[in-house]
C-alpha cells in the first residue's frame, strides 16, 4: 500500500470522526429546543431611597416574568391563553422560578430613578406545559368534545326535581345550569342546546328519571351525538332566619360528574356549595344557585380539558441497551428505577446477552428526557454512564460497585 494511499485513508477517517463528534452536540441541542427556549428580555426596577440593589432585583424578577410570558405566547394556543388568562397569570406570577431553568444578566445600568437590565433566560417548556395542563389550559388547538348537560334542578318551591329530558317537558330557567353552561362555554367547549332538543326530539320514556345512571346518560349522549355528558343535580334550600325575621339564609348545591360517551369512563367530578343571605327568596335562591353552578362549571371544565389532553399524549417506543449486567443486583435496581420513572410503561426485556441486556419501554417523551430523569433518579443508588442518546435509543453502562 503506497504512502499516498495511506495518507488519503487517514484523511477520510479523520473527517468522518470529527464530523461525528461535532454533529453530536447539534443533535442534542436540537432536542433540547423541544424542552427549553432561550430568550432575551429587558426589565426595569424603580429605585427607592437610592437602593439600587433592590431595584436591580425587581428588574431581574420582572424580566424573568416577561421571559415566561413570551415563551408561553409562542408555544401555547393564543385562544386558550385568552380564555384562561386569569388562571395563567395566577400560575405565572409568584412562581416564575418553576419555569426558569437558568438566566444571566447581559447588561445593566441605573437611569434616573430606574434600574434597567437585559437578561438572557432559558425557559423550561416542558414544565410550562405540565403546569398549564394541570390548570386545565388547552395546550394545542384541537376540537373539544360536544357536551350534553343532564342536570336535574330543584328550586325552593319545587316538590320534585325538574329535568328537560323527561316526558313532561321542562323549559323553566335554571340559574345553576345556566351558570354552569356559560362557564364551560368560556373554556371553548361546544354545548348542545337542550332547549332545541326538548322541543324537537322525542326522548324515550326509559330516560324519564332525574337521576340517570352512567349507562343511561352515555346512551342518551350517543343518541344526541355528544362526546361528553355531564350528569348531576342542583338543589336550593332555605336556611334559618338571620338576625331578624326578614333576613333568611339560602344554600345552593350542585353535584355533577362528566362521562365520556366513547368509553363510558368518568373523567371529572365535582360538588360545589354556595351560601348567602337575602330578604328576597327569589334573589337569594338565584344567587346561591348561580354561584354554585359557576364554581361547578369551572371545576368540571378544568378536569375535562386535562383528561382530553391526556388522551392525546403520545408514547414513544425507546430501546435501552444496558452494558455491565453481570452484576445482577445492580441490573435489577436499574430496571426498577426505569420502570418507576414517570411516563414509562410496558417495560419488556427484548434480548439478554452475557453482560448486556436490551429492554424496550413506552415513554411519554423523548430519549433525552428519559436520560435526564435517569441521571436524577439514580443519584446515590447506583452508578451509571449514559454515553449514547439518540432519537429512540439509550446506551447505558452499569459501573462496577
Image: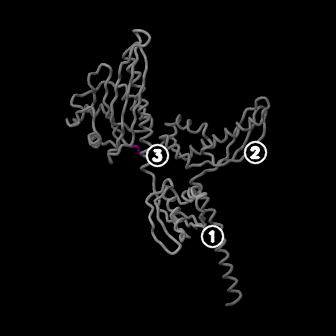
Residues 163 and 23: in front is 163
Distance between the alpha carbons at the discs numbered 1 and 2: 36 Å
Residues 252 and 280: in front is 252
Q: Are marks 1 and 2 in contact (CB under 8 Å)?
A: no
Q: Secondary structure at mark 1?
A: helix
Tell which tag, 3 or 1, sits nearer the viewer.
Answer: 1
Where residue 175 appears, x then y in whole percent?
37, 25
Disc 3: which residue: 141
Disc 3: CA contacts within 10 A as few (<14), some (14-19) or many (>=20)? few
Q: Which residues are magenta?
A: 139-144
Distance between the alpha carbons at the discs numbered 3 and 1: 38 Å
The quadrant in which the C terminus is found is bottom right
Where residue 280 appears, x then y in whole percent?
39, 13
Q: Which mark is residue 107?
A: 2
Q: Which mark is residue 20?
A: 1
Where residue 343 appears, x then y in whole percent?
48, 54
Amino acid at each position: 500500500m503506497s504512502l499516498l494511499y495511506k495518507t488519503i485513508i487517514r484523511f477520510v477517517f479523520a473527517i468522518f470522526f470529527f464530523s461525528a463528534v461535532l454533529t453530536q452536540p447539534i443533535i442534542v441541542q436540537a432536542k433540547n429546543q423541544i424542552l427549553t427556549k432561550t430568550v432575551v428580555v429587558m426589565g426595569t426596577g424603580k429605585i427607592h431611597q437610592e437602593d439600587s440593589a433592590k431595584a436591580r432585583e425587581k428588574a431581574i424578577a420582572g424580566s424573568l416574568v416577561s421571559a415566561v410570558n413570551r415563551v408561553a405566547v409562542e408555544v401555547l394556543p393564543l385562544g386558550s391563553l385568552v380564555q384562561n388568562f386569569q388562571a395563567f397569570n395566577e400560575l405565572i406570577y409568584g412562581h416564575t422560578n418553576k419555569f426558569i431553568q437558568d438566566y444571566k444578566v447581559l447588561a445593566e445600568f441605573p437611569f434616573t430613578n430606574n434600574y434597567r437590565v437585559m437578561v438572557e433566560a432559558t425557559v423550561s417548556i416542558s414544565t410550562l406545559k405540565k403546569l398549564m395542563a394541570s390548570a386545565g389550559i388547552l395546550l394545542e388547538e384541537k376540537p373539544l368534545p360536544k357536551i350534553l348537560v343532564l342536570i336535574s334542578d330543584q328550586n325552593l318551591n319545587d316538590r320534585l326535581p325538574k329535568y328537560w329530558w323527561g316526558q313532561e317537558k321542562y323549559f323553566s330557567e335554571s340559574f345553576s345550569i345556566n351558570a354552569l353552561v356559560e362557564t364551560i362555554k368560556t373554556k371553548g367547549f361546544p354545548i348542545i342546546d337542550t332547549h332545541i332538543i326538548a322541543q324537537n326530539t322525542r326522548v324515550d320514556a326509559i330516560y324519564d328519571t332525574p337521576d340517570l345512571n352512567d349507562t343511561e346518560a352515555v346512551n342518551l349522549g350517543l343518541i344526541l351525538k355528544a362526546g361528553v355528558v355531564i350528569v348531576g343535580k342542583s338543589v336550593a334550600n332555605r336556611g334559618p332566619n338571620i338576625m331578624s325575621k326578614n333576613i333568611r339564609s339560602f344554600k345552593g348545591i350542585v353535584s355533577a360528574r362528566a362521562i365520556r360517551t366513547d368509553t363510558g369512563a368518568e373523567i371529572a367530578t365535582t360538588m360545589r356549595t354556595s351560601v348567602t343571605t337575602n330578604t328576597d327568596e327569589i334573589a337569594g335562591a338565584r344567587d346561591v344557585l348561580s354561584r354554585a353552578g359557576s364554581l361547578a362549571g369551572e371545576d368540571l371544565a378544568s378536569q375535562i380539558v386535562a383528561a382530553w389532553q391526556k388522551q392525546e399524549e403520545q408514547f414513544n417506543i425507546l430501546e435501552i441497551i444496558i452494558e455491565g449486567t453481570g452484576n445482577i443486583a445492580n441490573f435489577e435496581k436499574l430496571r426498577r428505577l426505569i420502570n418507576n420513572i414517570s411516563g414509562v410503561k410496558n417495560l419488556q426485556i427484548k434480548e439478554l446477552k452475557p453482560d448486556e441486556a436490551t429492554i424496550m419501554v413506552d415513554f411519554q417523551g423523548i430519549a433525552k428526557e428519559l436520560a435526564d430523569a435517569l441521571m436524577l433518579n439514580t443519584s446515590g443508588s447506583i452508578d451509571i454512564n449514559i454515553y449514547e442518546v439518540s432519537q429512540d435509543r439509550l446506551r447505558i453502562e452499569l459501573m462496577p460497585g
